[in-house]
Image (cartoon, rainbow, N blue to C red):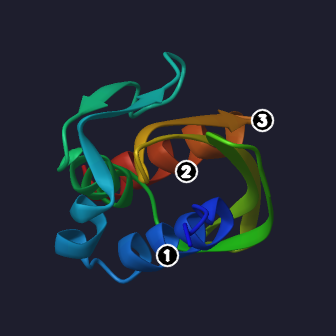
Amino acid sequence: MSSKFDAEAFVRALYDATGSADWERAETMLTDDFFVTEADLMPFAGIYRGRDALRELYTKVMGMMDVTGLDLQVITVSDDHAVALLDMLLAGPPETRVPIAEMFRFRDGRCCEIRPYYFDPQPVIAAAERKARATA
């Protein structure tokens, strides 16, 4: 009896691992050639590669903005992809919700790519600029 890859459970587990800074567990869920691509207009733009890419990106993002959490709304899946719709919560006042769609691509039961899409990047850019001014 073969078990089918449960992409939704996988994505939830990856969010849980990264959200609790369990980088060791998160890294076991990624392929050796894993990468995440952040759009050029984002303050943390770039392509982050390797199993430690999520740790590198999260450290950078959390250092640039006051992120208070993620509110995962829904995950939809296909054979080798998933898309999660979520809000990134930024500290206020007032607290700001930033809608994001994150595309996950899978290979051999692991994640090989994540590509986030921001509905409106301006709140993220403003939050990074605000924190840079406050820490300057």
Residue 52 visible to an observer of this rendering: yes
Distance from label 3 to label 1 (Cα)? 27 Å
Q: Which residue is mark 1?
A: 13
Residue at 28 percent across and 32 percent down: it is 48
Q: Residue type at mark 2?
A: Ala
Report the front residue among 14 and 123: 14
Q: From the viewer's perspective, is the residue at label 3 or at label 2 nearer?
A: 3
Up the image or down, 56 lies above or below 2; here it is above
Task: Give the class, few, some or many, for how many residues have Cα within 10 Å of label 1's Cα (few <14, many ≥20).
Answer: some
Assess whether mark 1 and mark 3 are in contact (beta carbons under 8 angstroms): no
The answer to which of marks 3 and 1 sits earlier in the sequence is 1
Task: Give the class, few, some or many, for how many residues have Cα within 10 Å of label 2's Cα (few <14, many ≥20).
Answer: many
Residue at 68 percent across and 34 percent down: it is 117
Q: From the viewer's perspective, is the residue at label 3 or at label 1 nearer?
A: 1
In this picture, residue 2 sits left or right of residue 24: right
Where's residue 61, x and y in %?
38, 51
Distance from label 3 to label 2 (Cα)? 13 Å
Distance from label 2 to label 1 (Cα)? 28 Å
Residue at 30 percent across and 66 percent down: it is 26
Q: Which residue is mark 3?
A: 120
In this picture, residue 21 sits left or right of residue 9: left
Quadrant position of residue 29:
bottom left
The answer to which of marks 3 and 2 sits earlier in the sequence is 3
SS for callout 3: loop
Task: Give the class, few, some or many, for how many residues have Cα within 10 Å of label 3's Cα (few <14, many ≥20).
Answer: few
Q: Which residue is mark 2?
A: 127
